[in-house]
Image (cartoon, rainbow, N blue to C red):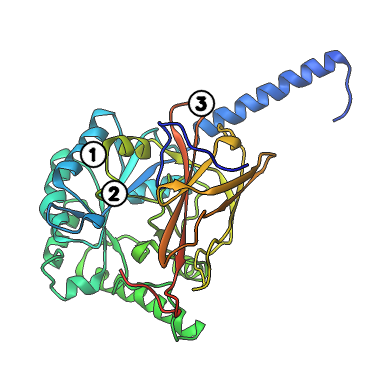
Amino acid sequence: MSATSAASSRPTGFVGSRTSSRGKVRAGCLALASMAAFFSSFASAASGVVLEYHHVANDTPPSTSVTPAKFEAHMDHLADNDFSIWPLPKLVETLREGGDVPERTVALTFDDAYASVYDEVFPRLQDRGWPFTVFVSTGSIDKGIDAYTSWDELRQMEAAGVTIANHSVDHAHMVAQGDRDRREWLEDARANIVDAQARLNEELESPARLFAWPFGEFSPPLQRLLADLDYVGFGQQSGAVGPDSDFTALPRFPLATGFDSLDSFALKVRSRPLPVAEAEPASGVLGPDAERPVLNLTLEEGPYRPETVRCYIGGGPAETEIDESMPATLRVRPTEALGTGRTKINCTAPATDGDQWFWYSYVWMKPNPDGTWYSD
């Protein structure tokens, strides 16, 4: 069926054998008990939310910034509503091991190690006693660019308990193969990760083996490379993380001007992972001639109704069809031809056992018409 407009509270923009009658009653009771146990298990299944910030400043690009006042409002919301703020490594390890994660658990991350992370974020979160993670592109720090923190500042933060992690050497579009053959391309990607970790190891005491994909761009060959190197990876596609998430490209909610309202923030930090068993195609990298690519999602059971899933692209509804038989299949297509660059699909559904939303995102990446990669 085609997507329809959502209710005003919906997040947008983003995105056998025969028995006697007595036996039937008993079987029905057992089935209901089993179903109740299943939904109870699903409802309590461990999950958390990872937030992603870049700049926290008044004078930096709005597309990658929140103001200090808005950041403080976000943190106040977490404090006032009894959220648990966990270190990112703890959340990852607990989910991978199938441990318990309290409801309303959040991890805070900051990409690129901009100066405002040290000047604005560090003192504010130190005052609250809250952990956070900084993903560092080492080349920018080595160049001593004023817009970024320094190694001394990163060492100060690490000594205070901040997690420092890998964001590559040069923050390149790693999915762009360009004129390189496949082997050279993957060797360059490996070096970009390994060399960055070597610099972190040289300058710091114990940097984490966590990796944030530059620009949130990744593809299956790169994900396999990251797994071979034994890293956990993070993208910039929206959604909560759970034990069944892909640990080479875990979702995070990006926060920036225009996507940082408190109402939107409150929905995001309470979200749960939409149980997507399979996404086809596995890669969001497109050719330059792609216009309206189709995304097919296979959805598993859970405390939501498949017919309530809605998908959005660029703030408007996507063309959506769903087969509600379980496992449900969802077909998502843009209503217009995609432009060059990244285009995010956000699919959401209200929970039937609470006031949260299930959330899943997917990113299309389309090069320039001549096949070269776009710039940011």
If you read the primary sequence from the N terminus, does the residue marked by circle 2 or circle 1 appear first? 1
User: Which residue is rendered at x = 33% and y = 38% of the image?
Assistant: 264
Instruction: Assign a secondary structure to mark 2.
Output: loop
Determine if residue 35 is in view: yes
SS under mark 3: loop
* Residue 249 against residue 142 in the figure, above or below: above
x, y (%) of residue 50? 35, 47
Callout 1 secondary element = helix
- Front disc: 2 or 3: 2
Q: At 37% across and 50% down in the image, what residue appears?
A: 252
Q: In the rendered structure, are the residues bearing label 2 and label 3 in contact, judged by CB atoms less than 8 Å apart?
A: no
Residue type of the residue flagged with mark 3: Asp
Residue on which the image places disc 1: 74
Asked if the residue at tag 1 contacts the one at tag 2, i.e. Cβ–Cβ closer than 8 Å, the answer is yes
Q: Position of residue 210 (x, y in %)?
A: 36, 60
Mark before the other along the chain sequence, 1 or 3: 1
Look at mark 2 in the image and give the residue it sits on. Answer: 255
Amino acid type for the residue under numbered disc 1 = His
